Amino acid sequence: MLRLGEKIVIVADAFEQSLPIGDYGYLIAYDRNPDNAFDYVIRVPQANRNFYVTAEDVEAEEQLLEAEAERATHEALIDYALFTHNEKLFHHLMNGEQTVEEETEKTTKESMSQAEFIKQVNLRAWI
């Protein structure tokens, strides 16, 4: 739930009420009427108006900036992988798949831990 006075960005217009999509505004009130479909009342300074909006129509500016920064970082890493011909990094970024070396390391660690576990069980059973 958004806080009062928080800076928000209008991302959608679910009820087609001519909201200025992409503009910012400030959350000025919660709409607590259970018979109403709207969740918030926002103030848009550029339009010099107040709007009733649903929770899906607005997004906190901080969250949008974080998502944009993550997307830009991901694209920069892809460009770097292509420029340096780093095939492993490229496949990891595009598919999210693990490399063969990482998979073998995990299986050897798991098998070692299982072998150590069996050894420990046998030692305790002997005692």
Image (cartoon, grey):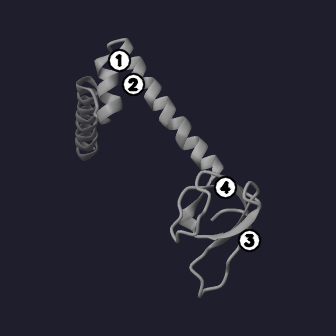
Dot label at residue 29? 3
Check disc 3 and give the amino acid type.
Answer: Ala
- Mark found first going from the N terminus, 2 or 4: 4
Secondary structure found at label 1: helix
Q: Residue at x 45, y 31 (%)?
A: 74
Q: According to the image, label 2 marks what residue?
A: 78
In the rendering, at what x and y percent does residue 62 appear? Answer: 64, 47
State the CA–CA distance, disc 1 to disc 3: 48 Å
Q: According to the image, label 4 marks what residue?
A: 8
Secondary structure found at label 3: strand
The reply to whether callout 1 and callout 2 are in contact (CB within 8 Å) is: yes
Does residue 16 appear in the picture of this structure?
A: yes
Check disc 4 and give the amino acid type.
Answer: Ile
How many other residues sit within 10 Å of disc 3, few (<14), some (14-19) or many (≥20)?
some
Dot label at residue 63? none
How many other residues sit within 10 Å of disc 2, few (<14), some (14-19) or many (≥20)?
some
- Mark found first going from the N terminus, 1 or 3: 3
